[in-house]
Image (cartoon, coloured by chain):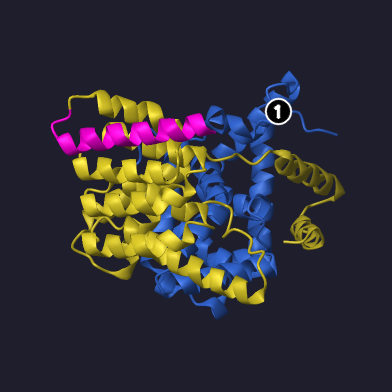
Amino acid sequence: MDGSAEGSDERAMAAVAHGDPAALAALYQRHHARIWAFFLRTTGSRPTAEELTHDVFLRILRYHASFKARRGGFVRWMYGVARNVLADHGRKPPPAAAREIDPDELASELPSPSAVLFATEERRRLIAALGRLEPAQREILVLARFEGLSHRDIARLVGCSEGAVKLRVFRALRRLERLLRENHEPTPR
Amino acid sequence: MSRHRADEDLESVLRHCADDDERERLRRLWGRLGALASPAPPPDLAARFSAALHDARANARHRRSTGWRLAAALAAGLLLGIVGTRQLAPITDGPSGSAALELQLREARHALALAALPGATATSRLTAVTALTPAAARDARSRSALAALAAADRDLNVRMLAAQGLGPHLDDPELLATLTGMLDADGEPLMNIVLLDVFVERSATTALPAIERLADQASDDPLVSEKARWAARTLRQRRNRT
């Protein structure tokens, strides 16, 4: 994580604690897109991603006093809030059927409308396979691959050792590969 | 995370692979995952977040913590467009001027929050307008907030004071259009008179059509009709002179 950005976040949190609404607004503008993307990748639903993103920033506002700058950076703390929100969401009664990520929901992941058909289909299969991972595996892979968090940050975030994070990422990656194979995805050479 | 650190993290993951073949496959898979473009949130997400904040505040109205006051202020700020990726406008004055301006803008920011609080009293909002007015010369967000208050505040005195505060900035065509629109929309005779004074004082001849419409209307208030006719006459004379 960028040190200056982290310092800026911490100053913003201090300002939030002193009642400065512009500081929270700055945090929202700086981070809502990545939090939204995190939820979209873990839930596969745009409406859910939006709802959970709102919930994260409401909780940041409500529980700002629990942020301790010296106990780790803001981004890690924010992802901790996001994981709690995700966990609470997971405890809600599921919809009629167990949900898998619909690749169409993640259509914006596709590079552009002009992408060649093969590339589009390959990405579609990849996203679909990602959606069939167990939620915990999907989460660890999303954190490690898409959110720019180091293994050390993830370890502190999820409460395990760095070694355990590496192993979990490896298992998630291997599982993803198997899911692709099961879907007759040719392994690229 | 730096590229170097990311590479190190990946290699430490791939150490768990059974053989070189698996290591290469998973490395390629990792690369393919990284090639997926980041999805972008909908552009109106901030506005919907603002609405969510309002709802949350409404659901917890009995709670008067700083957090909920902040929520309301932020929500209003998002709606007013004062919250953006841009920070405060760059300050180009000398050191002492910068400090004064910075202080002024900081005060204006608090005033923005105060003005945006739905629960704030009319007196508080009047105080906020007073604080915003001097900052409006340099800060577009203060002008936007004043325009919002002039157009929509439920208290006539707040609307009038905000409209007066915008007078010096009528060279901004959007502001001029906003105030001209108020002449048609705000039915309060006193507000109309304030607006007419502002237009004449700033020689805003582009407001003439709206002023003439008002002058031609059979207003219930003869003072407004008379004032509108006077304003139209004065502005026509100035336009003809130029």
Q: Residue at x 50, y 37 (%)?
A: B173
The quadrant in which residue B211 appears is: top left
Q: Amino acid at mark 1?
A: Glu
Q: Residue at x 54, y 64 (%)?
A: A158
Q: Is residue B187 magenta-colored?
A: no
The quadrant in which residue A20 appears is: bottom left
Number of disc labels: 1
Which colour represents chain B? Answer: yellow
Dominant secondary structure (helix, strand or loop) of the stretch shown in magenta: helix
In the picture shown, does residue A70 fall above or below A117? below
Q: Residue furthest top?
A: A117
- In this orientation, which residue lies closer to the viewer: B242 or B6? B242
According to the picture, the residue beneath numbered tag 1 turns out to be: A122
Relative horizontal placement of residue B84, taking residue A4 as reference (left or right): left
Residue A87 visible in image:
no
Q: Quadrant of the C terminus of chain A?
A: top right
Span highlighted in magenta in the image: B219-242
At which x and y percent is residue A148?
A: 67, 56
Q: Dot 1, crowdedness within 10 Å: few (<14), some or many (≥20)? A: some
Q: Residue furthest bottom?
A: A70
Relative horizontal placement of residue A58, taking residue B106 as reference (left or right): left
In the picture shown, does residue A82 fall above or below A115? below
Residue A26 visible in image:
yes
Which colour represents chain A? Answer: blue
Q: Residue at x 39, y 30 (%)?
A: B208
In the picture shown, does residue B3 fall above or below B241? below
